Image: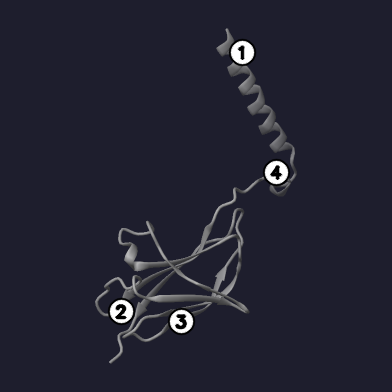
Amino acid sequence: MSRIVHRSSLLATFLAVMIGAEACSSPSELAFTCPDMLVRSIVVEIRDSATAAPLALNARGVVRDGAYVDSLLLGARLTADPATTYERYTFSRPGTYTVEISLDGYQRWSRSNVRVEKANCGVETQHLSAKLVPLS
Protein backbone atom coordinates (compact mmCIF):
# COMPACT_ATOMS: atom_id res chain seq x y z
CA MET A 1 0.00 0.00 0.00
CA SER A 2 2.81 2.46 0.86
CA ARG A 3 4.37 1.93 -2.61
CA ILE A 4 1.12 2.97 -4.26
CA VAL A 5 0.80 6.06 -2.04
CA HIS A 6 4.47 6.95 -2.68
CA ARG A 7 4.05 6.60 -6.46
CA SER A 8 0.85 8.63 -6.34
CA SER A 9 2.57 11.46 -4.47
CA LEU A 10 5.49 11.41 -6.93
CA LEU A 11 3.07 11.59 -9.84
CA ALA A 12 1.15 14.43 -8.21
CA THR A 13 4.40 16.34 -7.59
CA PHE A 14 5.52 15.79 -11.19
CA LEU A 15 2.19 16.97 -12.57
CA ALA A 16 2.22 20.05 -10.32
CA VAL A 17 5.69 20.98 -11.58
CA MET A 18 4.69 20.44 -15.22
CA ILE A 19 1.48 22.46 -14.81
CA GLY A 20 3.47 25.25 -13.13
CA ALA A 21 5.96 25.22 -16.00
CA GLU A 22 3.15 25.43 -18.56
CA ALA A 23 1.66 28.42 -16.74
CA CYS A 24 4.77 30.51 -17.42
CA SER A 25 4.41 32.79 -20.39
CA SER A 26 8.07 32.48 -21.43
CA PRO A 27 11.03 30.16 -20.80
CA SER A 28 12.85 32.98 -19.00
CA GLU A 29 10.26 32.80 -16.22
CA LEU A 30 11.24 29.22 -15.37
CA ALA A 31 13.57 28.92 -12.42
CA PHE A 32 16.86 27.50 -13.65
CA THR A 33 19.98 26.99 -11.56
CA CYS A 34 23.34 26.21 -13.11
CA PRO A 35 25.82 24.09 -11.18
CA ASP A 36 29.18 25.66 -10.34
CA MET A 37 31.37 24.08 -12.97
CA LEU A 38 34.18 24.92 -15.29
CA VAL A 39 33.23 25.06 -18.96
CA ARG A 40 35.68 24.85 -21.82
CA SER A 41 35.49 28.17 -23.60
CA ILE A 42 38.16 27.54 -26.25
CA VAL A 43 39.60 24.24 -27.43
CA VAL A 44 42.47 24.21 -29.95
CA GLU A 45 43.67 21.08 -31.72
CA ILE A 46 47.33 21.63 -32.65
CA ARG A 47 49.03 19.63 -35.41
CA ASP A 48 51.95 19.86 -37.82
CA SER A 49 50.62 21.21 -41.14
CA ALA A 50 52.70 18.79 -43.23
CA THR A 51 52.61 15.55 -41.21
CA ALA A 52 49.51 16.03 -39.02
CA ALA A 53 51.63 14.99 -36.02
CA PRO A 54 50.18 16.17 -32.66
CA LEU A 55 52.03 19.20 -31.29
CA ALA A 56 50.12 20.41 -28.22
CA LEU A 57 52.45 18.71 -25.76
CA ASN A 58 55.26 21.28 -26.22
CA ALA A 59 53.29 24.23 -27.61
CA ARG A 60 52.38 27.39 -25.71
CA GLY A 61 48.96 28.98 -26.08
CA VAL A 62 47.55 32.36 -25.04
CA VAL A 63 44.06 33.87 -25.26
CA ARG A 64 43.44 37.63 -25.19
CA ASP A 65 40.29 39.70 -24.91
CA GLY A 66 41.19 43.37 -24.45
CA ALA A 67 43.19 43.64 -21.21
CA TYR A 68 42.31 40.05 -20.26
CA VAL A 69 45.14 37.58 -21.00
CA ASP A 70 45.28 33.92 -20.00
CA SER A 71 47.15 30.74 -20.92
CA LEU A 72 45.74 27.71 -22.65
CA LEU A 73 46.18 24.47 -20.71
CA LEU A 74 47.11 21.07 -22.06
CA GLY A 75 43.88 19.15 -22.59
CA ALA A 76 43.12 15.83 -21.02
CA ARG A 77 40.50 13.32 -22.14
CA LEU A 78 39.21 15.50 -24.97
CA THR A 79 40.49 13.36 -27.79
CA ALA A 80 41.90 9.89 -28.19
CA ASP A 81 45.33 11.58 -28.22
CA PRO A 82 45.44 14.34 -25.56
CA ALA A 83 48.80 15.51 -26.98
CA THR A 84 46.83 17.20 -29.80
CA THR A 85 44.67 19.54 -27.72
CA TYR A 86 44.99 22.74 -25.71
CA GLU A 87 42.01 24.27 -23.94
CA ARG A 88 40.88 27.16 -21.76
CA TYR A 89 38.42 26.63 -18.92
CA THR A 90 36.38 29.54 -17.63
CA PHE A 91 33.55 30.43 -15.28
CA SER A 92 31.17 31.95 -17.84
CA ARG A 93 33.49 34.50 -19.47
CA PRO A 94 32.10 35.36 -22.89
CA GLY A 95 34.18 37.61 -25.11
CA THR A 96 35.91 38.08 -28.44
CA TYR A 97 39.35 36.53 -28.21
CA THR A 98 42.60 36.38 -30.12
CA VAL A 99 44.16 32.94 -29.76
CA GLU A 100 47.92 32.54 -30.26
CA ILE A 101 49.90 29.31 -30.44
CA SER A 102 53.69 29.18 -30.51
CA LEU A 103 56.19 26.33 -30.68
CA ASP A 104 59.93 26.37 -31.28
CA GLY A 105 60.71 25.44 -34.90
CA TYR A 106 57.27 26.56 -36.17
CA GLN A 107 55.69 29.79 -37.38
CA ARG A 108 53.46 31.46 -34.78
CA TRP A 109 49.74 30.69 -35.34
CA SER A 110 47.04 33.23 -34.50
CA ARG A 111 43.27 33.48 -34.90
CA SER A 112 41.41 36.74 -34.20
CA ASN A 113 37.73 37.41 -33.53
CA VAL A 114 37.03 34.08 -31.81
CA ARG A 115 33.63 34.77 -30.27
CA VAL A 116 32.75 32.90 -27.09
CA GLU A 117 29.03 33.37 -26.48
CA LYS A 118 27.14 33.07 -23.21
CA ALA A 119 25.02 29.93 -22.86
CA ASN A 120 22.42 28.78 -20.31
CA CYS A 121 25.17 27.38 -18.09
CA GLY A 122 28.53 28.92 -18.86
CA VAL A 123 29.59 29.57 -22.43
CA GLU A 124 29.42 27.92 -25.84
CA THR A 125 32.72 26.12 -26.48
CA GLN A 126 34.66 27.25 -29.56
CA HIS A 127 36.70 24.52 -31.31
CA LEU A 128 39.71 25.61 -33.38
CA SER A 129 42.24 23.71 -35.47
CA ALA A 130 45.80 25.06 -35.57
CA LYS A 131 48.01 23.59 -38.26
CA LEU A 132 51.51 24.86 -37.49
CA VAL A 133 53.91 25.46 -40.39
CA PRO A 134 57.53 24.40 -39.81
CA LEU A 135 60.20 27.08 -40.20
CA SER A 136 62.35 26.64 -43.31
Displayed quadrant of residue 80: bottom left
- The amino acid on which the numbered mark 1 sits, given as a three-letter code, is Val
Q: Earlier in the sequence, mark 4 or mark 1?
A: 1
Residue with the mark numbered 3 = 110
Q: Label 4, secondary structure: give it.
A: loop
- For the residues labelled 1 and 3, the Cα–Cα distance comes to 63 Å
Q: Label 2, secondary structure: give it.
A: loop
Residue with the mark numbered 4 = 31
How busy is the neighbourhood of tag 3: few (under 14 within 10 Å), some, or many (20 plus)? some
- For the residues labelled 4 and 1, the Cα–Cα distance comes to 28 Å
- For the residues labelled 2 and 4, the Cα–Cα distance comes to 48 Å
Image coords of residue 31 (percent x, y): 70, 43
Residue with the mark numbered 1 = 5
Give me the residue at 35% from left, 59% from top: 79
Identify which residue, 85 or 104, lies in the foreground.
Answer: 104
Q: Earlier in the sequence, mark 1 or mark 3?
A: 1
Identify which residue, 67 or 94, lies in the foreground.
Answer: 67
Q: Earlier in the sequence, mark 4 or mark 3?
A: 4
- The amino acid on which the numbered mark 3 sits, given as a three-letter code, is Ser
